[in-house]
Image: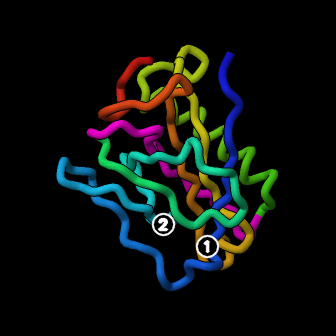
């Protein structure tokens, strides 16, 4: 049985004006660092599975993908509503879109895969400053991974 999805809120009220630059594709000489939830991008490898679920999460531990890591950002999808649709609507959107993007990244449907996913999504506070991104994050419930999960077919 799959592990339940972890919904993690992203709020950037504390980060307004001081978000860190987006990480570039990870190289062997990259060092571990916390990155702003606003600077996540597809291919970012993270150690976030053991992080407490928080409404005011602003930074996430990022690591080079060549090193053992817990998860990897595999998609960024945008919520295209004119006004904040509410947490329930945003989380329903995140689940639907992250599941639909999963197979294209892993190479198996979510139902067939041993991997799982969670996501980061905008809150009403971050929406107010323009945040519309949902970041879909794949992880192995059995432990850490080394290298990318892209096309891992597991």
Range shown magenta? 66-84
The image quadrant that residue 86 belongs to is: bottom right
Taking depth in this image into account, of 121 and 32 the one nearest to the observer is 32
Image point (56%, 59%), residue name: 133
Residue 27 percent across, percent down from the top left: 21, 50
Label tally? 2
Residue 70, magenta (yes or no): yes
Question: Circle 1 is placed at which residue position?
Answer: 12
Residue 137 percent across, percent down from the top left: 52, 42
From the viewer's perspective, is residue 154 above or below residue 128? above
Image point (26%, 51%), residue name: 26
Asked whether, in this view, residue 41 is left or right of residue 14, the answer is left
Badge 2: residue crowd in 10 Å (few <14, some 14–19, many ≥20): many
Q: Name the image quarter holding the C terminus.
A: top left
Question: Circle 2 is placed at which residue position?
Answer: 36
Q: What whole-number distance in Å separates the C-alpha atoms at marks 2 and 1?
A: 9 Å
From the viewer's perspective, is residue 149 above or below residue 52? above
């Amino acid at each position: 049985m799959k592990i339940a999805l972890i919904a993690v809120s992203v709020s950037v009220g504390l980060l307004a004006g001081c978000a860190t630059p987006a990480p570039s594709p990870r190289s062997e000489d990259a060092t571990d660092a916390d990155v702003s939830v606003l600077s996540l991008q597809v291919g970012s490898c993270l150690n976030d599975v053991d992080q407490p679920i928080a409404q005011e999460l602003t930074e996430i531990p990022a690591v080079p993908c060549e090193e053992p890591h817990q998860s990897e950002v595999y998609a960024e999808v945008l919520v295209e509503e004119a006004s904040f649709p509410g947490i329930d609507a945003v989380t329903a959107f995140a689940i639907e879109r992250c599941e639909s993007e999963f197979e294209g990244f892993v190479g198996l449907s979510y139902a067939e895969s041993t991997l799982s996913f969670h996501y980061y999504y905008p809150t009403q506070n971050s929406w107010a400053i323009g945040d519309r991104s949902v970041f879909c994050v794949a992880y192995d419930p059995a432990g850490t991974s080394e290298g990318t999960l892209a096309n891992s077919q597991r």
